[in-house]
Image (tube, rainbow, N blue to C red):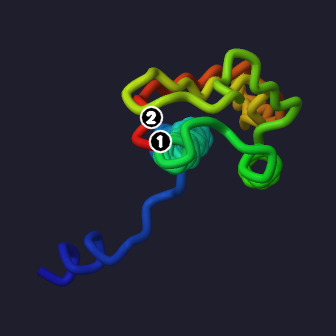
Amino acid sequence: MLKLIKKMNKKDDGSFISIGPVIVTIIFIGMLLIGFTSWMTNIDRKTQLDSIARKYILAMETTGYLTADQESALEVELNEHGLNNVIFSGTTKAQQEYGEEIILSISGDMKIYLFSNTGLKANSSIGSAPVKIVHRSTAKK
């Protein structure tokens, strides 16, 4: 009986083979989480830009067009949320009558997070992607 207790209390020699797969799995899951987080950050940024555009198209419904003040405020707000080189080509900038179509067209370069994995080395960087947002409505004035 004493021999059995001594055998149970004896420490086994450690081996990397037994803990190696656990370490590799933890590293792999960490890399997946970082990649997923950067991907979700990019999606969230695009959603914020769409919300800003919706807010301004609703304001355009009451005025019938995008005023110069609205345009400058919109550009500042878009820049704050990571959209650079903003162009409003195709946007309605002349007064429209009640019921006529108004368009808010925004294009630019959105700042995005890039994550790549080459072997055991993970790379992250900041890049840009072209974005075009178009909202249509009718004038209510």
Q: Amino acid at mark 2?
A: Ala
Q: Which residue is mark 1?
A: 61
Residue in the picture at 71% in, 29% down: 93
Q: Position of residue 2 (x, y in %)?
A: 19, 83
Residue at 29 percent of width and 78 percent of height:
6
Q: Of residues 1 and 55, which is closer to you in this image? A: 55
| Outermost residue, front side | 97
Quadrant the C terminus occupies: top left
The spot of residue 137 in percent (x, y) is 42, 29
**Residue 139 circle label:** 2
Disc 1 packing (10 Å; few <14; some 14–19; many ≥20)? many
Location of the N terminus by quadrant is bottom left
Determine the secondary structure under disc 1: helix
Task: Say which label, 2 or 1, has the lower sequence index.
Answer: 1
| Residue situated furthest bottom in the rendering | 2
* Residue for point 40% across, 41% down: 140
- Asked if disc 2 and disc 1 are in contact, CB closer than 8 Å, the reply is yes
